[in-house]
Amino acid sequence: MTGLRRRIARSPTEPNRTTNTEAKRKLVGLVERARTNGIEQGPLTPVEALITVDQEEWVWQVVDRDVLEVLSHRLVFESSAGKRREILMTAGIDTAMDAASKIVELDGGCVLIETLDP
């Protein structure tokens, strides 16, 4: 990371001021680096929250390893706009079919059942 300048004053009495022109130049550089890094990283993958906060109540989502090994199917809801969202995972095709039927009955739309890779 050559070419980066020190951003912390060497002594506590040394003033650290930036003009509007310098601030704009630094901001443009920061935005360009962020865009470049975003392109290099590729498309983002949504990650579900491990914690849900509802008013003052915090719910931690923890799954035991034994439960994860039993899961065999995932239900994915596909909206009319084409967006996909994983809803839940089940242990068995019968449970997956029952859950998908109930979701379609209540909400409509399309629920896909996918097998989990072993």
Image (cartoon, grey):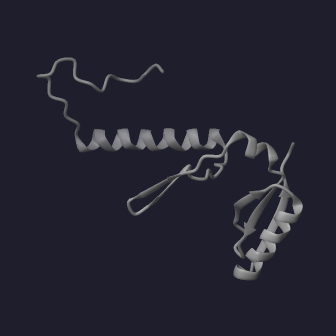
Q: Say which quarter of the image contains residue 55.
A: bottom left
Q: Residue furthest left?
A: 13
Q: Is residue 117 left or right of residue 61?
A: right
Q: Is residue 56 left or right of residue 102?
A: left
Percent position (x, y) of residue 61? 58, 50
Percent position (x, y) of residue 38? 58, 43
| Residue under the point 56% across and 49% down | 50
The residue nearer to you, when weighing 77 against 71, is: 71
| Residue under the point 72% across and 60% down | 88
Percent position (x, y) of residue 45? 66, 49
Q: Is residue 20 above or below residue 114?
A: above
Q: How many marks?
A: 0
Q: Say which quarter of the image contains residue 78.
A: bottom right
Q: Quadrant of the C terminus?
A: top right
Percent position (x, y) of residue 70? 81, 47
| Residue under the point 63% across and 40% down | 41
Q: Is residue 57 left or right of residue 97?
A: left
Q: Is residue 78 above or below residue 104?
A: above
Q: Is residue 79 above or below residue 92?
A: below
The residue nearer to you, when weighing 118 against 40, is: 118
| Residue under the point 50% across and 41% down | 34
